[in-house]
Image: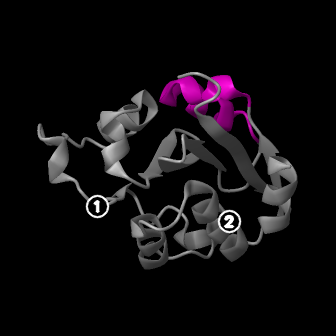
Amino acid sequence: MNDEALDFALAAWREEGRWSVSSMPPRVAEGLDTLVKALRQLPGEGGSLGFVSVADEFLLVIRVAGESVRLVLSDLNAAYDWPLAEQAADLLGIELPDDEDELDEPEPAGDVTLLADLGMDAAELDVLCSDPELFPDEQLASIASRLGFATEVERALA
């Protein structure tokens, strides 16, 4: 993936009840393994979160805590066009239909409960990812606002 396709790659983690958010280098979006390794190095209570958007096509939300890796891909359709999304679908054990036209609406995939203990329940995340009118940055803004780190995300994206 070229750097121009990457909209953002952010990491978020909580220490002593306070959120920290930082940009990650574009190379972390080259592959799921690289992203997971980068997130494992962060000191967060309950793990760390990663948010990656590519070409305004999809948002990947990933939570890494020890050996546990949980993720949500906002739109499974992206797996047809973007290797990172395809790797996410593979990790989730999802076989894509041969006919790309079978998935005509955004179809979230993955563990929509991964943010529940932080304050965003599965139904909220599912609805957010299913909304065809929202771009990934808007999805991230909603998540960050709900979980209490919207200001930190704004600073990291500035």
Relative to the observer, which residue lies in front, 112 or 43? 112
Q: How many marks?
A: 2
Q: Give the magenta-colored segment's residue range.
A: 25-42
Give the percent coordinates (x, y) of residue 153: 78, 57
Residue 39 within the segment the image draws in magenta: yes
Give me the residue at 11% from left, 37% from top: 98
The colouring scheme, among rainbow, by chain, secondary structure or one colour, is: one colour
Relative to the observer, which residue lies in front, 50 or 85? 85
Residue 86 shown left or right of residue 45 in the figure: left
Q: Few, some or many C-alpha atoms within 10 Å of disc 2 (few <14, some 14-19, many ≥20)?
A: some
**Dot 2 lies on which element?**
helix
Give the percent coordinates (x, y) of residue 38: 67, 31
Q: Amino acid at mark 1?
A: Glu
Q: Which mark is residue 141?
A: 2
Give me the residue at 65% from left, 50% from top: 47
Give me the residue at 31% from left, 46% from top: 77
Q: Few, some or many C-alpha atoms within 10 Å of disc 1 (few <14, some 14-19, many ≥20)?
A: few
Measure the alpha-carbon separation of dots 1 and 2: 22 Å
| In the rendered image, the vertical position of residue 31 relative to residue 79, given as above or below | above
Q: Which mark is residue 97?
A: none
Viewer-side label of 1, 2: 1
Q: Quadrant of residue 105?
A: bottom left
Q: Amino acid at mark 2?
A: Ala
Residue 86 shown left or right of residue 114 in the figure: left
Give the percent coordinates (x, y) of residue 156: 83, 49
Q: Quadrant of residue 130?
A: bottom left
Circle 1 is placed at which residue position?
105
